[in-house]
Image (cartoon, rainbow, N blue to C red):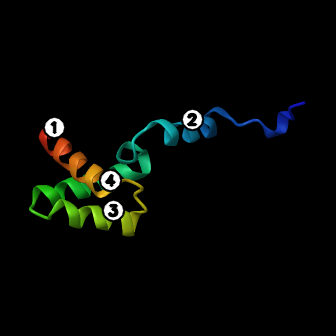
Amino acid sequence: MSDENNKLNLETFAEQKIKDILPWREQPENKEIWSEAVEGYKNGIPGVVIAEWLQKEHDCPLLVDSIRKGLRVSLEKA
């Protein structure tokens, strides 16, 4: 017995799925933050400092090692 009024529209459904399937750094609301982190890493800010900033200031759920690896990979792709 589903209620038609409780069904999600496509845009809302897609937003929820994107959060489930995309890595944190690729989610639309985090792309700019991640770009700032990569730029800082490129300019010499240590990965561990950036990881702490992402975790404390932007509620990034990733572990420090995952962030550091992601920064290295992102820098290699740039």
Q: For residue 50, which numbered disc appears in the image?
A: none
Given residues 60 and 10, the one toward you in this image is 60
Q: Marks 3/1: CA distance?
A: 20 Å
Instruction: Name the residue that disc number 2 marks.
Output: 14
Q: Which image quarter: residue 13?
A: top right
Q: Marks 2/1: CA distance?
A: 27 Å
Q: Secondary structure at mark 4?
A: helix
Mark positioned earlier in the residue sequence (2 or 4): 2
What kind of residue is marked 3? Leu
Instruction: Name the residue that disc number 1 marks.
Output: 77
Q: Marks 3/2: CA distance?
A: 25 Å
**Disc 4 versus disc 1: nearer the observer:** 1
Mark positioned earlier in the residue sequence (4 or 1): 4
Mark positioned earlier in the residue sequence (2 or 1): 2
What kind of residue is marked 1? Lys
- In-image side of 32 versus 48 (left or right): right
Q: Secondary structure at mark 1?
A: helix
For the residue carrying disc 3, how many other residues have a C-alpha within 10 Å: few (<14), some (14-19), or many (20+)? some
What residue is drawn where x is 29% and y is 57%?
A: 64
**Disc 3 versus disc 4: nearer the observer:** 3
Instruction: Name the residue that disc number 4 marks.
Output: 32
Q: Marks 3/4: CA distance?
A: 12 Å
**Disc 3 versus disc 2: nearer the observer:** 3
Q: Are marks 2 and 4 in contact (CB under 8 Å)?
A: no
